[in-house]
Image (cartoon, rainbow, N blue to C red):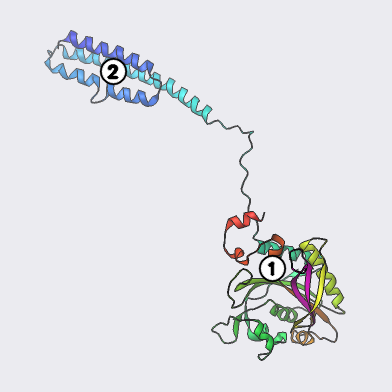
Amino acid sequence: MDLAGLEVELRGLQAKALRDIAATDAVATLDELGSSLLGKRGAITDLLRGIGALTAEDRPKVGAIANEVRAAIESALSAQRSSVGAAELAARIERERIDMTTPGPAPRLGSLHPIPETIGAIARIMGSFGFTVAEGQEIEDDVTNFQLLNIPEDHPSRDLWDTLYLREPGRLLRTHTSPGQIRTMRATPPPIRVILPGRCFRYEAVDASHGFEFHQVEGLLVDRGATLADLKGILDELARGLFGSATKTRFRPGYYPFTEPSVAVDVSWSGARDGWMTILGAGMVHPTVLENGGIDPETHQGFAFGLGVERIAMLRHGIADLRSFLENDVRFLRALR
């Protein structure tokens, strides 16, 4: 092909390229078009493969024409990219526009587990009577867990507990929160008003109403002139605070080695067979226990109570199976909100 023929081909390629570029409305398509025209294997390179057949005089002329064509195409591509790119950006901004006045999605709120929630409710109610919250220790010794609470080694009431003993002689996981009575009385001079919430452990088969790990709240008041009537008044208010102002209470004779007299406390409950549900045990602190705590029973009296937190939580929230507290299922917690 001679000089004239190559020029015609190059000018024709330029004209077609400019039309195609002007008709393209996507940056990605423009990039592909640019590669097909200007790349190493593009249309211009293909046309220039025949330049070797030209005379030495015509070769520079063809090169100059090719450079003009290349420059025109590059200029057109750059201008079209700017225009199309701006249009694409404007369309994307419009497509992704956020109305700042539109309410966002409501955040998923957490909630307390029923066990600490119930302990907190008890603490608030008892706090209104001047009771403070203290902690006992989960690993106890046999003396404090049993003997100082008027439960000697041969006492038949020990059959009430299946105890988890540790390898160290005389050490165990506490079976109830009552050892906290002894430790509190020995550490704090009267008057004493304290509740001691915490975990307890017993060797029991797990079912809908029993567990090897459970929570109790121990209450203790020691002062001059404390009476069973004081205990009844406080527990009446505790029951109404937990279950509603219309709740009625019933006190029945009970037995606990560390209180004398002892009572079992029931609340009116429509779901119970006889209309009453037992929620806790209580009584006047036994004089022997007061002495073991370093308190003179001739000058000071006290009362104590203990309740199972899981039982209270099950009644408050209508939970049928105690094992639900341990399954770590967030659906269970959401259902209680």
The answer to which of 207 and 51 lies nearer the viewer is 207
How would you rate the neighbour count of disc 2 (Cα within 10 Å): few for under 14, some for 14-19, many for 20 or more? some
The answer to which of 70 and 305 lies nearer the viewer is 305
Residue at the top extreme of this rendering: 4
Residue 5 image offset from top left, x and y in percent? 18, 9
**Is residue 265 one of those drawn in magenta?**
yes
How would you rate the neighbour count of disc 1 (Cα within 10 Å): few for under 14, some for 14-19, many for 20 or more? many
Relative side of 201 to 5, left or right? right
**Is residue 282 one of those drawn in magenta?**
yes
Question: Hey, which quadrant is residue 36 in on the image?
Answer: top left
The answer to which of 37 and 239 lies nearer the viewer is 239
Report whether residue 87 is seen: yes
Residue 166 image offset from top left, x and y in percent? 56, 82
Q: Amino acid at mark 1?
A: Arg
Residue ID for mark 1: 311
Residue ID for mark 2: 70
Relative side of 18 to 258, left or right? left
At horizontal 63% and vertical 65% (from top left) the residue drawn is: 321
Q: Which span of residues is magenta-colored?
A: 260-283
Q: Amino acid at mark 2?
A: Arg
